Amino acid sequence: MNTSAILHDVRRQRLLILAVGLLLFVPFLGSVRLFDWDEINFAECAREMIVTGDYLHMQIDYRPFTEKPPLFVWAQVALMHVFGINEFAARLPNAIVGVITLLVLHSIGRRLHGNGFGLIWPLVYAGTLLPHFYARSGIIDPMFNLFIFLAIWQLIRGELDGASRYVQAGIFAGLAVMTKGPVGLGLVVLTVIAQWIAGKRSTASARPFPAAGIAVIIAIACILPALWLGLDAMANGPQFLLENLQYQWRLLTQGEAGHAQPWYYHSLVLLIGCYPTSVFFLVALRKRTDLSDDERTMRRWMIVLFFVVLVVFSAVTTKIVHYSSMTYIPLTYLAATWIVRRGVVTPAINVAPAKAGAQIEDVAPAKAGAQIEDVAPAKAGAQIEQSHITDNPWAPASAGATGLIILAHSILIGGIAIIVPLAFMNSEWMLSLPSFRDPFLREAMSRKVEWLGIEPFIGLILIVGACAFAILLRRKPLAGIIALYASVMLFIFAFLPLVAPKIEAYSQGAALDFYQSLRGRDVYAKPLTMKSYAHLFYTDKPPDLSSAAKGIDVDAWEPWLINGPVDRPVRFVCRVNDLANWKDQPNLRELYREGGFVFFERITSPMDPPSQNR
């Protein structure tokens, strides 16, 4: 195969990954409304940028928002200018990031292990439950994770090539900081230090501490945030920097917004949520002695990155599912290497050394029917190591155990996906259970939501895929792997438009319907007790209805709306669980209840007639 044909194949691979990625991540992005808090939080920041025309400062309810930098929100703003202020535009940045991530994994995988691995790694990533799900969300973490990984990859590439790439790593670390804050730089620096320790322990040769490299990374990473902070400080002073640092400290030491969890929380999330890859990852952690130097280097960095992220976010008091999402890339890499070692991709094939500057234009097939799919230019004395996809069988004992574990895992996840729709579709039975007492859940499940009847069968997709994997594993491992990961992709593709909107209708639908009914009306809207950003985004709240416009402090806003000399009608929403706090408030009149929420209006005297407009 000549070089032009090889390049043509690589282009076709990239086009295939691009097309598949767009097909997986873009459809149905707007099929379900944004979820409180995070999705609506960032979308609302983007909406307020557009409404105010202030693209430099992050705002929420037209007050400075200091918890996150603006890079992800800027991406949302750009797409909202094209597609409108809606759910599709709010989630599209992550769909694009998801596609880019697949292309990055393909490129790096090919460089490290050949074409076969370059195709397997994106397949594993896209077919893992949580990475795929978050690529279709409106939260900042997929973009943050990509920048962190690219920073780490620059350091790995520098070690492989024997050339410093600290500047490039610093640039990507700076973009991570602009996406989520100083934790981006902290994770990169901690990973550099930890891998130096791991590398020093694994080899007898002296490894000088990379103090100069760390200094370069920090210096370069601070340039872009410093420029933005400088511009922001000229307008608002050091408010963002001081309040953001306070926020980071609260996350570290307190359970922010009720998200305190046990130390093992993220380990459970990864084990269950990263189906089916977490099973392969666990066995991939076993020490290997048959690795090349490049493989050993990449493996060391990926293991270190995984555990740095896991330990850091396990130590942080505030624990949310997506905080550990940076582990998804090293987790899928290690799992993919183990899958390849099981025979889905043949071991590297050594070809005779090439002369300096020569290009290998034609290599004989490794065996009958096999084809070398990628050959790179060779340096003097180097060996060309290539791989290709094959269908070599796994060892029977290994195949049987792996198949059973994956099948059990699929029954757990698929069973939940079956039981949840069935429970909602048979809400009368659930409500009859004496143990089912939560007031909000009882009223939420009493809401009338139309089900097609096929929704519980979507969970069967995972179980069928696992069964196909177990059956095909010994004789056709590639077909088994494709069936397994394709089942996850198909499951998410069907779940999001068919099940997620109905779950959303129960969990927050009544409140969002109420807020949307207030769009375009000169009315104040405020949730009571519960933390929410939904009333801002789904009422299209204008600046003149904010506490900032009235010159009222945030903490005094709710009391003013309830008891103060309001100049407009006021509507309130609370969960039925919190009703006792508000039902005897003399200035509040209940309008109606629906889906676990109670809706009030403000009255100025007991004789005021109730509003006729819900």
Image (cartoon, grey):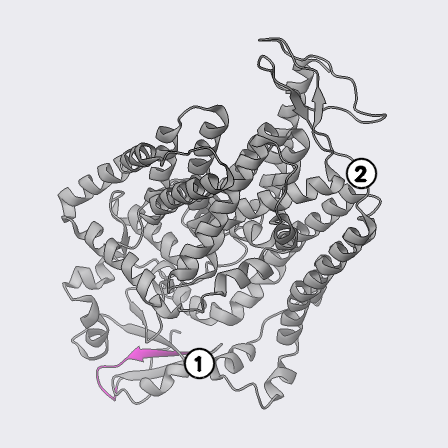
Q: Amino acid at mark 2?
A: Asp
Does residue 591 lie above or below 50 as drawn?
Answer: below
Q: Amino acid at mark 1?
A: Arg
Question: Residue at coordinates 77% horizontally, 47% vertically from top-left?
Answer: 480
* Residue holding disc 2: 391
Q: Position of residue 198 (x, y in %)?
A: 47, 43
Magenta residues span 597-607
Q: Position of residue 236 (x, y in %)?
A: 15, 48
Measure the alpha-carbon separation of dots 2 and 1: 60 Å
Magenta-span inclusion, residue 126: no
User: Is residue 559 visible in the rendered structure shown here?
Assistant: yes
Between 577 and 382, which is closer to the camera in this rendering? 382
Left or right of residue 48: residue 75:
right
Left or right of residue 609: residue 594:
right
Q: Secondary structure at mark 1?
A: strand
Between 291 and 256, which is closer to the camera in this rendering? 291
Question: Residue at coordinates 47% horizontally, 78% vertically from top-left?
Answer: 596
Does residue 463 lie above or below 138 as drawn?
Answer: below
Q: Label 2 crowding class (10 Å Cα cut-off): few <14, some 14-19, many 20+?
A: some
Quarter of image, res 421: bottom right
Q: Which mark is residue 593?
A: 1
Quarter of image, res 470: bottom right
Does residue 337 lie above or below 484 as drawn?
Answer: above
